[in-house]
Amino acid sequence: MIELANRLNRIVESNTLRMAKLSRELAAQGKDVINLSLGEPDFFTPQHVKEAAKKAIDDNYSFYTPVVGFLDLRQAISAKFKNDNGLDYAADQIVVSTGAKQSIINVLLSLLNTGDEVIIPTPFWVSYSEMVKLSEGIPVYVKSTVEQDYKPSAKQIEAAITSKTKAFIFSSPCNPSGSVFTKDELFAIAKVFENHPKIIIISDEIYEHINFIGKHESIGQFDFIKDRVVTINGMSKSFAMTGWRLGYIGAPREIAQACDKLQGQFTSGTNAVTQRAALAALTSDMKATRDMSLAYKRRRDLVLQLMREIPGFIINEPGGAFYVFPDISFYFGKSDGEKTIENCEDFCMYILNNAMVSLVGGDSFGAPECIRLSYATSDEKLIEAMTRIKNILLKLK
């Protein structure tokens, strides 16, 4: 029998990917499954970005790239941070990676020693906790509820700090809740960490441009903590480039250099053609991105309207991203006579098997009373999915 590494026992399979896999298996059996489990735009990559990639192929961008990314791309990212976010990251503080997921694990592996604690507000993106564990750190959760718009207070965060705290990681707009932190809320959190100079703040801003409430705010804008903020971003969500795999960080130089060293032994540089496409995306007109965001807002409003017709769902109004994260604990303990819903996992499997709609349980996001639903699909599919969910839940008593 093959003995695998103990580190694998620290982590679990991504629940979002598991539910997507189950829905694909049902679809392969000829079932009419509506997949609302994956966080993936249903739009195509903008044409001018694809043209840049085609040109890169013709221009023979087929060789190894610098580990940290092409200089002109890092300069464009530096300019983007300055112009869009008011953040000062020089080109040598930028590291380009194979997706924002790699960017995050690079940072955590560069920072954490065994037993270091990382504060994570709940709900959180499923991989944060597992990445911390893989890095031999300890996730420390700060609970928030739908009544708080899924945003824990600065006081709650401060109460979680110990002598072992090494980092704080969060997302805004948030996956899975869609909640967006305001400038005042970020300032209050920043003031907490002002008094703890050894703690690094990791700000995941991958949904920056899918924002329905106004200007995006970055926690790194505050001078008194900016030298301890790592800002994560990438191309997947805002530019519909999930399969292209490109993420990036702006970071203190020591952390950028550490990620360079680490990535050089893992994957080396990011795909050359993808980098040329990303350069075009970041330096061109943002109309396609704005149009996608408007479409997501319309879909959000549609889903909220339909969801309010379902008894027992408690919902907030997401300010960004493309998810709704309702509290569905009303259905715990209810039964159709054969199946009793004990938890969010039971709820999701009941919906998948009986309504052929794939959702994700909130337990993986640190909120076991909730489910996550992605509305990154067509209006027609959303209407059909919500109708199916509403009808099948009427059977539970």
Image (spheres, rainbow, N blue to C red):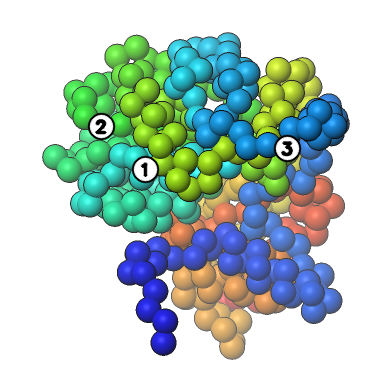
Disc 3, SS: loop
Q: Is residue 312 above or below residue 100?
A: below
The residue drawn where x is 57% and y is 84% is: 339
Disc 2, SS: loop
Inspect this view and state whether residue 16 appears: yes
Q: Amino acid at mark 3?
A: Ser
* Disc nearest the viewer among 2 and 1: 1
Q: Which residue is mark 2?
A: 199
**Depth check: 44 or 97 in front?**
97
Q: Which residue is mark 1?
A: 108
Q: Kindly check if marks 3 and 2 are in contact, taking CB atoms under 8 A apart as contact.
A: no
**Residue 110 location (% of width, % of height):** 34, 40
Location of the N terminus (image quadrant): bottom left
Q: Amino acid at mark 1?
A: Leu
The CA span between labels 2 and 1 is 12 Å
- Label 1 CA crowd tier, 10 Å (few <14, some 14–19, many 20+): many
Q: Quadrant of residue 299?
A: top right
Q: Which residue is mark 3?
A: 62
The residue drawn where x is 28% and y is 44% is: 112
**Residue 162 location (% of width, % of height):** 16, 41
**Depth check: 73 or 133 in front?**
73
